[in-house]
Image (tube, coloured by chain):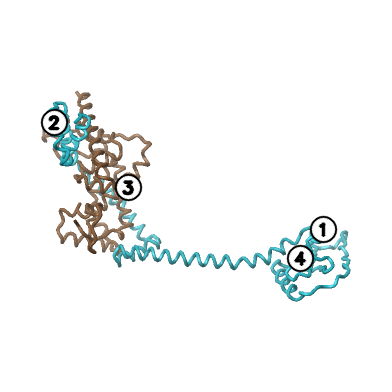
Chain colours: A brown, B cyan
Amino acid sequence: MELRSDGSPLGPNEVWMSEVGARDRTPEESASNAALVARAVAGEPGAFEQLMVGNERRVLTLAWRLMGRMDEAQDAAQEVFLRAFRYLHRFDGRKPLTPWLMRITVNVCRDLGRKRQSLPTTFSAMDKPPAESAAMGPAGNPHEELAADERRQMLWVALDRLPAKERAAIVLRDLEGLSTEEVAALLKSSQATVRSQISSARLKIRKDIERMKGTMP
Amino acid sequence: MKCSRASRLLALYVEGDLQDSQCGPLDDHLRECGDCRNLAAELVESQALVKSLRSDAVPEAALSSVRRQVLPGIARIDNSHNWGLRVERALMSRFRPRYAMTAIAAILVVSGVFVSGIVWRTGSESIPVAEVIQPVQEAVPPSVDVERQLPDPEALEIVVETPVQSRPLADLASEASEVAVATPTLLEPRELPVVDPPAIDSPNRGPTPPIVVKLVTDDPNVIIYWLIDSEQGDGV
């Protein structure tokens, strides 16, 4: 069991908060991160910018996967960093910053999602980033690349059709690569609930993909 | 195991999210059910597609756009005069969060008690002032009612004054308290003096001051002032 510095056991949320992001960090990195947070709280210019630069890609990517639109994801990411700056003094610098920022991102996206709930949203090709990698097809083959792009579009549409809670769970589990336990902690939910949401989302996505395959030439 | 239940478990099984205790029965079912084996294969394929989205990266332009928007916003927050946040930040940066939060809570409680004490004290001090002014302001009922309220008509002294200038009610109130202290004994009844009304048709008549009638009773705490607007012609 993990313990706090005063000897008391960590809660379930704190366990993952201390694990996620810390997995790839050395003690020196943790110490420098804590020092950077302390300097940012003390108002040193540039310290927060450094923290932001180190985490902006992860925050914006998560926001984009949760919101589905790049313009809304940018708005969400801005709000995330402004909130983080405002309340950075409440953050325990001994812990990794990334999980804290991810939690803020989920909250901000949920708030923004509620506001736009009445508006119909669809994923359009403009919202997708350029295919920077050739993960879907071998480079140089236009037919394969086209097919890969169509599959990508299909997947985004399937994700967009999911209810917000199921989409958040599947994005965090399958796209962000967090464990079920970590997802549950981040969404402030039970592991059983998260498993149910993930299961339902995966079955719906499979169904959507099969249906769209049938309509594709 | 029914196929409907097996399908829900399969969605977790393909990614290793299923608990160990549930894997055995599901394996048994998969050995028997071809449809569920097909479903498992399709789920593996769709999951591979979903995970391929991990490679989609956000464009650099979007990142720099966020940075351009956030940094001026941070400067605005830094320069704002949010003293509550500043105090909280100063405390949290010097002490461990748990102790700082305790200190903030203690400060809030103490300041709340202090402010509520001031409000209570201010409120209790204002009550006697209102009690002095109130009878003076209400001293305008008709004469019949005044006589009816008096405890003893024999012990009534009515003094009619025609002040040159009207005085504020607060002065009248203080004067009333002085009179009440100075004449605590029973007064002899006497005749009411007749007051000549001002000449109504006088051409050079200016604004006529109101007539103040002071009713002194045998009760030192009860003194009634009656303000009469002589221009309206109402008699006593």
Q: CA distance from mark 1 to mark 2?
A: 104 Å
Q: Is residue A208 above or below residue B16?
A: above
Q: CA distance from mark 1 to mark 4?
A: 14 Å
Residue B14: x percent and y percent?
15, 36
Chain to which the residue tagged by mark 3 belongs? A
Labels 3 and 1 within one chain:
no
Q: Nearer the viewer, mark 4 or mark 2?
A: 2
Task: Rate crowding at label 3 as few (under 14), some (14 to 19) or many (20 or more) other CA atoms within 10 Å.
Answer: many
Q: Nearer the viewer, mark 1 or mark 2?
A: 2
Secondary structure found at label 2:
helix
Give the residue number, with chain letter if any, for mark 3. Answer: A108
Observer able to see residue B52: no
Give the residue number, with chain letter if any, for mark 1. Answer: B144
Q: Amino acid at mark 1?
A: Val
Residue A59: x percent and y percent?
25, 48
Q: Residue A37 or B27: which is nearer the viewer? A: B27
Q: Are marks 3 and 2 in contact (CB under 8 Å)?
A: no
Q: Earlier along the polypeptide chain: callout 1 or callout 2?
A: 2
Q: Earlier along the polypeptide chain: callout 1 or callout 4?
A: 1
Q: Is residue A201 above or below residue B140?
A: above
